[in-house]
Image (tube, coloured by chain):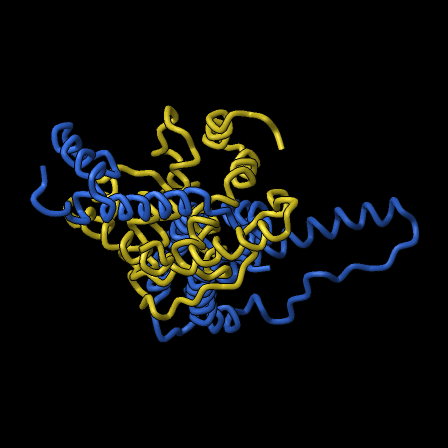
Amino acid sequence: MSTFPDRDLVLRVRRGEVDAYGELVGRFQASVFNVCYRLLGERREAEDLAQEAFIRAYERLGTFDLERPFGPWIRRVAANLCLNRLNLKSPSLMPLDEESDVPEENIPDNPEAALEAHERATAVRAAIVALPAHYRAVIELRHFQELEYDEIAKTLKLPENTVKSHLFRARKLLAERLKYV
Amino acid sequence: MFDHHPSDELLNEYFDNLLRSDQREVVAYHLTDCKECTLRVEALILLYNDLKNLPEIELTRDLTGVVLRSIRPSLAMPRRWGWAVMTQFSLAGLLLLVSLPVILRSEAMQGVNFFDMQFLDAFDEILAAFFNQGFVFLNRFSNLFSEIFQAFQQTDLPFSIVTLGPVVLATGVLWLVGNGLLLRNQLSESKKKRFYRF
């Protein structure tokens, strides 16, 4: 993979070099997939949505602000797609796939610690997926996309106070399920 | 100073740095003195850290190829193009059906043999014959058209020959519209999302 900055790749894509977009996909596909997986809880669907996010982003590349980083933008596109998808589904229909949460290169030397980290991550992921869709959305946008409250409100087309209230309740539910309280 | 414990909302706002400085000071002061609320904030911190440190799941397949195939204009004929082409074929077929009886009834079609080539041994003879037959072919072809035209004028048809004019014109217009649709679809199709599964 080349070391071109994301901005240069975007400019090349805008000039018609489709292959440069392949480099952007290669760089961000894992993080985009993870956004989709956290929101959907299903690998196959998350992969499809990640793929669709890149296609959608390509179509809208003209609207991308070159002064901003590409990563958060494409993850936001993916999150929006998933949120649209979630509106069509009942939260109870979404199982969580069994996944290996610890990337191989990050597995600690201590197998017990590795197992504990894996179990912890699995529990956190399961707790997120078990949340109602609107709570899951605010958790994703606040904690993973690191959006401010007003940005979340704009994304979800909700009043800011509702976003706050969703976020507090979502955190409370997560804390209860993860037995912090 | 609080008379009672701060609400969950307030603690969350404290945690998210959304409080005014005076409110923040009050909550911070309360937390130094209240074990119960300190535990509540610690639970939030634990949650925050778990979310922050949640490892990413590995992607088992590379999306690059499939995305690039989707965004490149496809050479395959999309479904909507198929409909446009079918319409064009139907219109062309209709025109042929209208004109075929007229052509078959023309005298020019009686005993026509376009390619009465003879087998010749020498190459120059073949070449000369080729050009010769070419001229013969073109001559007969032009004669055929003029004879067909005459036949149109002489034959007792159920419709006037001038009615073919609007038919041909309408077909031509529809053909052009069809091609316009094809071009429009071609432009939009390259932007349209399509899924490719492995």
x, y percent for residue A9: 51, 29
Chain identity for the colour blue used in the image:
B
Residue shown at 23% from the left, 50% from the top: A168
User: Looking at the image, which is closer to me, A70 or A95?
Assistant: A95
Residue B110 position by quadrant: bottom right
Chain A shade in the render: yellow
x, y percent for residue B73: 51, 46
Residue shown at 52% from the left, 61% from the top: B147
Q: Is B19 on the left or on the right of B121, as rendered?
A: left
Is residue B154 at least partly visible in the picture? Answer: no
Residue B64 position by quadrant: top right
Residue shown at 19% from the left, 46% from the top: A164
x, y percent for residue B71: 49, 45
Residue A177 in the image: above or below residue B36: below
* Quadrant where the image shows the C terminus of chain A: bottom left
Q: Is B91 on the left or on the right of B30, as rendered?
A: right
Residue A26 in the image: above or below residue A181: above
Residue sticking out furthest to the left: B3
Residue B196 in the image: above or below residue B132: below
Q: Is B181 on the left or on the right of A135, as rendered?
A: right
User: Looking at the image, which is closer to me, B53 or A6?
Assistant: B53
User: Looking at the image, which is closer to me, A108 or B150?
Assistant: A108
Is residue B49 at least partly visible in the picture? Answer: yes
Residue A57 position by quadrant: top left
User: Looking at the image, which is closer to me, A23 or A108?
Assistant: A108
Residue shown at 54% from the left, 37% from the top: A27
x, y percent for residue B27: 17, 37
* Quadrant where the image shows the N terminus of chain A: top right
